[in-house]
Amino acid sequence: MIFRVHHGSGVPIYLQIEAQVKQSIAARLLREGDALPPVRKLAAELRVNPNTVARAYQNLERDGVLRTVPGGGCYVNSQTSGLLYKEKIRRLKPLADQLAVEATQMRLAPSDAIDLLENSFKSLTHSATENSHD
Amino acid sequence: MIFRVHHGSGVPIYLQIEAQVKQSIAARLLREGDALPPVRKLAAELRVNPNTVARAYQNLERDGVLRTVPGGGCYVNSQTSGLLYKEKIRRLKPLADQLAVEATQMRLAPSDAIDLLENSFKSLTHSATENSHD
DNA sequence: CAAATTGTATTACCGTACTAATACAAATGA
DNA sequence: TCATTTGTATTAGTACGGTAATACAATTTG
């Protein structure tokens, strides 16, 4: 599991870590039960304070993405979201709205925006199949 | 033109204003040539410092969304983005990727996410037609 | 049990983002 | 022209976010 981080990007380190973990799970590079790097190891790799990594892991645990055993380690959770369909939609709507507004703003046709989203999904499943023979 | 703003939301006021202006334009509640509220008037309505509104307007001008006449006022620009198709896609891709990742994370089917995005587009055109007879 | 490895809690520093107060400048309009 | 209305620039204060140093606690492993 390789993570990379940009210090001067303005984006907080812990958010960059969270995003990469989520992406890795969505792309099935990380699967249920897999162990994440220990906070100290990852922190050393990224030249960052262990607390920064810990913060990312804690946020991910709060979001139900992973479970953590104090003294043990951090592991990818089963990704069963117990959410109702309507609740999922409610949470994703702001993001979709923003995408629609920005696309309209730059006069991109809705169909093109939809193609773009389809491709984002395809990218996920592609990296999944690429790594399914390990 | 009614704007609303939440002070304790953590989201900076000027960003809230920017988002609402963009939305209003995308939904064609505001059209090319329309005047925006003077910074002082809007600032008074929102109980906010004029500079905060000015900052939003300046950012929107930087983004080519509106043009501003010092001493005159602020007006909605013609929304012709001179961007190449590939550049539009490049700018929107991170947002689409995020939507795909989050949807996958909460185990929402891609088709449902696409429906959601379609509806976001429809909401825009609906509020447009609702207000096209003025 | 003891040592090593794991995650956690506390504290503090530092920068910067956000907002505001105030004064300035350009354009409009009676 | 003169007053009013518009946007702008400068400065500053306050709060908060991000990161780090350090010490603590729980688990694993020999």
Image: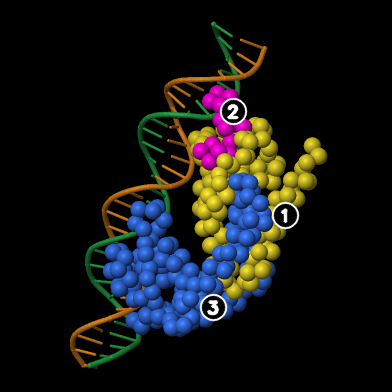
Chain colours: A yellow, B blue, C green, D orange
Taking depth in this image into account, of A81 and B76 the one nearest to the observer is A81
Residue B79: give its label: 3
Q: CA distance from mark 3 to mark 2?
A: 52 Å
> Seen from this angle, which residue lies furthest right?
A133
Q: Residues within 10 Å of mark 2 (few under 14, many from 20)?
A: few
Kind of residue indicated by mark 3: Gln
Residue under numbered circle 1: A122
Q: Position of residue B30 (x, y in %)?
A: 45, 77
Is the residue B94 above or below the residue C29 in the image?
A: above
Kind of residue indicated by mark 1: Lys
Q: CA distance from mark 3 to mark 1?
A: 31 Å
Residue A102 seen in the current view: no
Q: Position of residue B94 (x, y in %)?
A: 61, 57
Q: Residue at x 67, y 33 (%)?
A: A34
Decide whether residue A61 is among the magenta residues. Answer: yes
- The magenta-colored residue range is A60-75
